[in-house]
Amino acid sequence: MSETLTLLLVTVIIAVIVFFLYDRFGRYLLQYRLEATGIRVTFLGPFGGSRIPFANIAEVREVPGIGWNLLPSARPVVACRWGNRIFGRGVLIRLRTGFIKSILITPDNPDYFIEFVRERVKEISEANE
């Protein structure tokens, strides 16, 4: 086996291992917390992070399956990917304002997450009417 082929094989094996580890343990690095007024995205527990207020959410929906980062739709979607795993179901959050208008995340329970966010967004929009 040539040295170049060996190097290529080792690189592919390392890439597969890194992807597998990130897919399995990424949820411990990047986490999503549902709070009373918004979604808190944290890195390594309490460190850093961002907050997405419910009042700024225009839409939340599921993006299914493997390859969810290549959204099949009539119009292309450009989104900031805050996913903590590579495979699985994602959630697309569209914002009303801000530089970033769409965010892709991968919560542990997308169904509950979407339901909770939709309820809170509805409550806030009804309270502001």
Image (cartoon, rainbow, N blue to C red):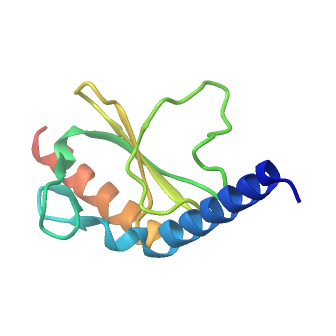
- In which image quadrant can residue 44 be found? bottom left
Left or right of 33: which side holds 73?
Answer: right
Q: Tell me where residue 96 appears, x and y as whole percent.
A: 27, 30
Toward the viewer: 3 or 34? 3
Q: How many marks?
A: 0
| Quarter of the view holding residue 72 | top right
- Which residue is depicted at the point 43% across and 74% down? 25
- Residue at 18 percent across and 49 percent down: it is 50
Q: Residue furthest right?
A: 1
Q: Quick check: 6 left or right of 41? A: right
Q: Position of residue 24 (x, y in %)?
A: 50, 75
- Which quarter shows the N terminus? bottom right
7 is higher (above) or lower (below) than 96:
below
Q: Residue at x 74, y 52 (%)?
A: 8
Q: Which of these two is toward me, 83 or 103?
A: 83
Residue 64: x and y in percent read 62, 56
Dividing the picture into quadrants, the one containing residue 109 is bottom left
- From what the image shows, is residue 104 above or below residue 39? above
Say above or below: 96 vs 23. Answer: above
What is the quadrant of the C terminus in the image?
A: top left
Determine the residue positioned at 44% across, 60% down. 106
**Position of 60 compared to 38: left or right?**
right
